Amino acid sequence: MRLFIGAKLADVHIEALLVAQRVLQANSQRLSLTKPENLHLTLHFLGELDQADVLLAQEVMMRAKFPAKDKLTGSIAGYGSFKRNDGELIFAKLDASEGCYVMLEQIYKGLKKNNLPLPDRPWLPHITLARRTHLLVPLEDLAAELPVTEEPVELQNIILFKSEFTDNGMRYTPILRRV
């Protein structure tokens, strides 16, 4: 089963991200937008796990000591991209609170203790907006049109997701919710 740990975003984040997607779509010759129901903050991608490791991942999530919910906040601070062979991956940068980093460290400790996959690079708090993007203008030229959120907003849930490729695109199914 292909799994990742993510955070459900607040409505104010989703609204801003949908505006950003419309701006990207209007300024692209090609792109593949992330479906609104799939917009999330990825905390850690676990990859393909067998059933025994899925159970361990659930246990890690249940045992992790998270900060209070009001300490798990973020604001959309800007936008960026990763170059890919098939175009750019465009993302919103999330300015995550210290509580998010504390929570992530708790998750990492549990993963390490149970020999589950750990990240091979530092966490970059971001929300993927579009893949395979071919912009008509540089992303920097769109900065004034892409919304940011001034005040930090609470993340809604921390979720262990199952990720599946389907004929209708990606499907993310919550396996376990926290917070």
Image (cartoon, rainbow, N blue to C red):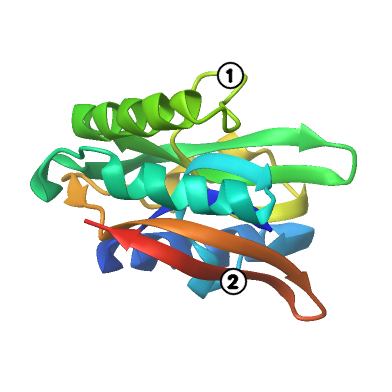
Q: Label 2 to label 1, Cα distance in Å?
A: 26 Å
Q: Which residue is drawn at 47% across and 68% down?
A: 174
Q: In which quarter of the image is residue 96?
A: top left
Identify the amino acid type marked 2.
Lys
Decide if residue 34 is on the left or right side of residue 103.
right
Locate residue 91, reporting x and y percent: 56, 45
Q: In this view, does 136 lie above or below 123?
A: below
Nearer the camera: disc 2 or disc 1? 1
Which residue: 51% across, 19% down? 122
In x, y percent, where is residue 20?
49, 58
> Hey, what amino acid is under mark 1?
Arg
- Residue receiving disc 2: 35
Q: Residue furthest top?
A: 121
Could you say which is closer to the camera, residue 5 or residue 55? 55
**Mark 1, other Cα within 10 Å: few <14 / some 14–19 / many ≥20:** few
Which residue is found at the position 76% from the left and 60% from the top? 31
Q: Residue 45 occupies which quadrant of the picture?
A: top right
Element under disc 1? loop
Q: Can residue 108 be seen in this view?
A: yes
- Mark 1, residue position: 121
Residue in the image at 60% along x and 42% along y: 46
| Front one among 30 and 3 | 3
Pinpoint residue 102: horizontal percent, then vertical percent.
Answer: 25, 27
Q: Is 35 on the left-hand or right-hand side of 122?
A: right
Apparent side of residue 122 relative to residue 77 in the rendered image (left or right): right
Q: Quick one: label 2 or label 1, which is nearer the N terminus?
A: 2
